[in-house]
Amino acid sequence: MENNGGKISFNFVEISRFYDTKDVFLVKGQSGVWSVKVSEIKLIMADIQYTKIVLIDNKTFTMRVPLNEWESKLPSEIFKRVHKSTIVNFSFVESHFSNQSKHFLKIEDWEGTIEISRRKQKLITNQNPRDIRPILG
């Protein structure tokens, strides 16, 4: 764990592994090692050289792991990169909507919305958000 300017970062204990939705990965922190269920990750958002992980109880923690690494480790059938700075677990997508030319996702029990990049917007249609999963690529 590193403390860099007030930001606390965690590190993977098992870094070279690909995770499935049933898996649990270990995170090393200041006071020990925690387990995080992959299925409980709602969002992963870039924060400069860190990533902010949001779990189902809206607990967040910050890791010094780039989004590209998350993208390569998590199951692509439900974890989709919808913006250069955001990966979403589509199991938690409540709805999607557009406002003028921009598209957004509403996540269960999450205040605010997640913007979908223009490149990904073309892949979204007006269907049930649970059906979006295979469309985003």
Image (tube, rainbow, N blue to C red):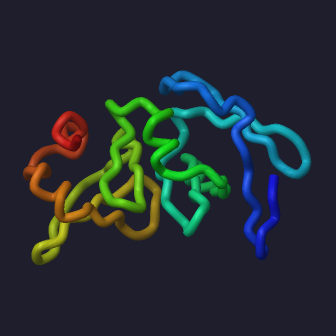
Q: Where is residue 109 drawn, in percent x and y? A: 46, 56
Vertical comparison of 95 with 79: above or below = below
Q: Residue at x 11, y 46 (%)?
A: 127
Count of numbered circles in the view: 0
In front of the other: 65 or 102: 65
Quadrant in which residue 112 is drawn: bottom left
- Quarter occupied by the C terminus: top left
Q: Left or right: 126 with respect to 102?
A: left
Q: Residue at x 59, y 25 (%)?
A: 17
Q: Residue at x 50, y 33 (%)?
A: 73
In front of the other: 3 or 131: 3
Q: Left or right: 99 with respect to 4?
A: left
Q: Where is residue 7 drawn, in percent x and y? A: 73, 68
Q: Residue at x 50, y 42 (%)?
A: 70
Vertical comparison of 79 with 113: above or below = above
Vertical comparison of 78 with 6: above or below = above
Q: Left or right: 120 with respect to 101?
A: right
Q: Where is residue 12 drawn, in percent x and y? A: 70, 39
